[in-house]
Amino acid sequence: MNNNVVAVSLFSGAGGLDIASKLAGVPVISSTDFDSDCIETLKLNDLYFGDTTIIPGDLHTIDSSIFKNVVKEKANDAKFIVIGGAPCQPFSKAGYWVGNQSRRGINDPRANLVNEYLRVVTDLEPDGFVFENVESLLHPTHKIIVEKFIEIIEEAGYSYKIIKANALDYGVSQKRKRIFIIGTKGTFKSDIPEKTHGAPDKIDGTSLRPYVNVGDAIRGFDGDEFFEPYEVVDGGTYAADLKEVPPGMNYKALTAWAGYPNPKFVADKRFWNFLLKLSPDLPSWTITAQPGPWVGPFHWDNRRLRVPEAAAIQSFPTGYKFHGSRRSIQKQIGNAVPPLMGKSMITFLKESLI
């Protein structure tokens, strides 16, 4: 494999960040995940993973030497990076990190997925890395987490950037805020990854394109050939109410707050995404991994989103295949890093290495 930079992917899931890496011109030489449906999803998509060594299993049980061997076999002296985002649950209790004196910073079993990421990075000593996670990682409650992470990577010889990012700014038709910690043994050529899109009323005089509206993102998937039994809401508890919510609104449209006659709900007494309905003329809200039965976003045609629609809103390539039950596929899509967002982050790192 003759490339300037290649990648080792951890916590690959359905392959969002792996696709991003390929789009950035950084082929992924190995991908791994513990979820069997995710592994089968990767195997279904030869266009992206045909040359990738797919390693199923829990990262706790995968020795770093396995990744070293893949790098030795496939990198051909190219520079390489590690990419991935450990599941965010470990960040719920930052106190687990306090008082740990080990080299890698974490020894509590409830926080050790991040430890495993750092274990691979410190063992493989890649030229750079991209670590993705939820925005709340930067909350003051979790300050010790970020500090310990930074301490470990600085000791390993990396310069770093912490990037607060919204998927909207990178061509994804979705409001989705995430953070990326990007480390390099090279030199960053700029302060932040280059944005490609912006709010329509704020991009005059710039090279930015307007945010992608969801109507454009999912056009072509409304035909009968894409029908799914899952999408049907008729006969459900709130089906009639959903039909009364205007596109771009949620249940609050049916409250006194909105001037609705004979209000059916009380404003601010429900989760904000209850009966949340997309507008074709605006970007989508965040696609979640495990939505409740009446949690949106719903299609403006008063139905749940279809798999190719949810995937398109996450910026998965058209025709990308997913393995598993409808519930499993929703989880895979909702947990993924939007490829177009990830592409900008990996491009930013790549530029520091070459």
Image (tube, rainbow, N blue to C red):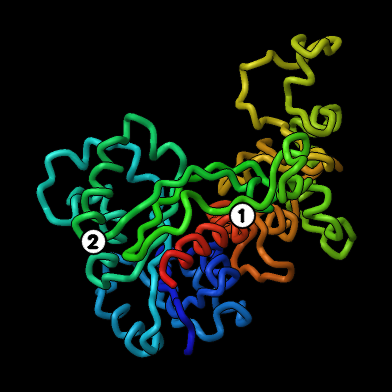
- How far apart are the alpha carbons under marks 2 and 1? 38 Å
Q: Amino acid at mark 1?
A: Gln
Marked residue nearer the N-terminal end (2 or 1): 2
Q: Which residue is mark 2?
A: 157
Q: Horizontal placement of 39 versus 209: left or right?
A: left
**Residue at (72%, 16%) from the top-left corner?**
265
Closer to us: mark 2 or mark 1?
A: 2
Q: Is residue 223 above or below residue 320?
A: above
Q: Position of residue 109 (x, y in %)?
A: 23, 51
Disc 1 secondary structure class: helix
Q: Position of residue 328 (x, y in %)?
A: 57, 58
Instruction: Find disc 1 in the rendering and name its residue.
Output: 330
At x 39%, y 37%, the residue is 138
The answer to whether residue 115 shows anywhere in this view is yes
Q: Is 196 left, or right, of 242 in this rendering?
A: left
Does any portion of residue 32 appear in the rendered image? no
Left or right, 343 with respect to 135, comes to right
335 or 23: which is nearer to us? Answer: 23
Q: Which mark is residue 183?
A: none
